[in-house]
Amino acid sequence: MIKFQNVAKTYPNGVQALKNVNLEIKDGEFVAIIGLSGAGKSTLLRLINKMIDSTEGQIIIDDTEVSSLTGKKLRLVRRNIGMIFQSFNLVKRTSVYNNVLAGRVAYHSTFKTIFGLFPKEDKLIALEAIETLGILDKAFIRADQLSGGQQQRVALARALAQKPKIILADEPVASLDPITTIYVMNDFKRINSEFGITVVANMHHVDLALKYATRIIGIKAGEIVYDGPSHEITDDLLVHIYGRSLKSDEVLGDIDENI
Ligand SMILES: Nc1ncnc2c1ncn2[C@@H]1O[C@H](COP(=O)(O)OP(=O)(O)OP(=O)(O)O)[C@@H](O)[C@H]1O
Ligand SMILES: [Mg+2]
């Protein structure tokens, strides 16, 4: 469970990225966060695993208030949260297998992992995750020799190997072509339904967000302006979230006018 109570984030440069955010995400939900560039989507995600600190309010993960956590307690909370980025964030010059095995790092001392001393059980977990994502044939290939879609699968396998309760994804398909996008989104859906892992994803593609997520959180200028089931989203609500129509003929009309 992820709970935000009156959360605000002002960056040191004075930008107020989030204002008075209240939300509760239950275990196993698939949530898409949508909104214009700069609305505060990445800020919201980064607050969940404490990559950044809030300036006001409480963030509660599974009954633990995380704002004040440090050291071992923070590591334990973070271990349950996998993170996926638009740019995959793999170690490019090493194998798929080693990248995925790195998902187990949080379970061991730094000393052991520096020397690659992972127990056999972890190696099996890593291979299992690679198999789940359908890239077992690529296990011993260097990550930089894979396509974008394959690299994002490696990142997903790494997150899965971490045995998380939550996966946060910041624009996970923004660098992928439309077909690969669908495959990767299907992987997210499968991971969500098969393993019951909560997925919270920032998405620029509204159609994809509506198709894959069961719940939409719309953010506008740092505030939640919609929070509800994806099937209840209407064009009017999208206009409210984005401040304008998303219909392509109207967008293109606007571009024509502004050229
Ligand atoms: N590290 C930072 N320091 C200062 N301001 C920041 C920082 N990160 C983000 N901001 C500002 O906070 C606001 C929200 O940014 P955020 O990255 O959360 O938006 P976003 O919705 O993820 O946008 P995008 O869709 O472009 O990724 C923006 O005005 C941004 O300029
Ligand atoms: Mg962002």
Image (spheres, rainbow, N blue to C red):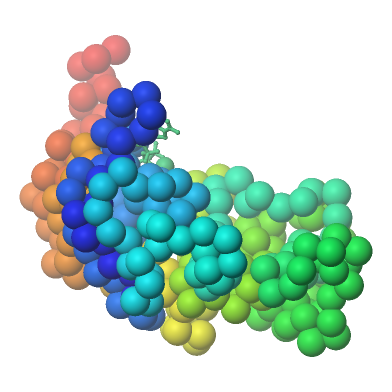
Q: From the top left corner, tell me how far across and down residue 178 is, in percent.
A: 50, 53
156 or 59: which is nearer to us? 59
Q: From the top left corner, tell me how far across and down residue 197 is, in percent.
A: 46, 78
Total residue callouts: 0
44 or 97: which is nearer to us? 44
Residue found at x 29% / y 12%: 259
24 or 144: which is nearer to us? 24
**In the rendered image of this protein, does residue 202 appear above or below residue 251?**
below
Image quarter for residue 118? Answer: bottom right
Residue found at x 69% / y 74%: 107
Q: Is residue 186 visible?
A: no
**In the rendered image of this protein, does residue 168 appear above or below residue 36?**
below
Residue found at x 15% / y 36%: 244
Image quarter for residue 17? Answer: top left
Residue found at x 53% / y 68%: 73
Q: Is residue 154 visible?
A: yes
Dividing the image into 4 quarters, which one contains the N terminus? Answer: bottom left
